[in-house]
């Protein structure tokens, strides 16, 4: 399960990597093809309901974030009982601020 903006974030990350010289034109074509034909067909976008938006707002407040992008992923994972995997070390550290334990369903992807 992912929020509806997942596809935009996924393809934007691919584009950013290519723009910054972290791949070739062939890598870009392969990555975009993979996103469009496999990944975005397998994941299940979930349009948030009122409670999900409220949960995302609460996560944003706890994390002291100006926006709810990351918080919406947390809210969807929490609400559905899914594991949340992220490569965002800053987000994981923010979750542990003020002595809060890292939720057991949040996992950091190590490079």
Image (cartoon, rainbow, N blue to C red):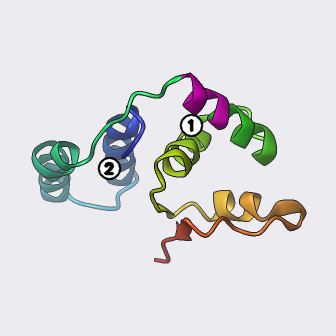
Mark 1 — residue? Answer: 69
Percent position of residue 46, x then y: 37, 34
Q: Position of residue 58 (x, y in %)?
A: 73, 37
Residue drawn where x is 15% and y is 42% of the image = 36
| Residue 103 part of the magenta segment | no
With respect to residue 60, does 95 lie above or below? Answer: below
Q: How many marks?
A: 2
Q: Single out the mark in the foreground, 1 or 2.
A: 1
Specify the principal SS of the magenta part: helix
Asked if residue 10 lies left or right of residue 54, the reply is left
Residue 86 left/right relative to 24: right
| Residue 91 in view (yes/no) | yes
Measure the C-alpha gap from mark 1 to mark 2. Answer: 18 Å
Answer left or right for 54 relative to 44: right
Residue 67 appears in view: no
Mark 1 or mark 2: whose residue is earlier in sequence: 2
Which segment is the magenta one?
A: 50-55
Judging by the rendered image, the residue that carries numbered circle 2 is: 14
Vertical position of residue 95 compared to residue 6: above or below: below
Crowd around label 2: few <14 · some 14–19 · many ≥20 (10 Å): some
Q: Which mark is residue 106?
A: none
Q: Which residue appears at 90% of the width and 61% of the height?
A: 98
Mark 1 residue element:
helix
């Amino acid at each position: 399960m992912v929020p509806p903006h997942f596809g935009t974030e996924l393809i934007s990350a691919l584009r950013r990597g290519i723009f910054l010289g972290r791949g070739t034109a062939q890598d870009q074509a392969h990555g975009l093809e993979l996103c469009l034909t496999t990944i975005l067909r397998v994941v299940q976008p979930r349009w948030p309901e009122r409670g999900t938006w409220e949960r995302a707002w609460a996560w944003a407040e706890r994390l002291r974030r100006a926006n709810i992008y990351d918080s919406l992923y947390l809210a969807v994972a929490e609400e559905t009982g899914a594991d949340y995997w992220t490569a965002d070390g800053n987000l994981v550290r923010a979750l542990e601020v003020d002595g809060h334990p890292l939720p057991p369903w949040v996992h950091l992807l190590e490079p």
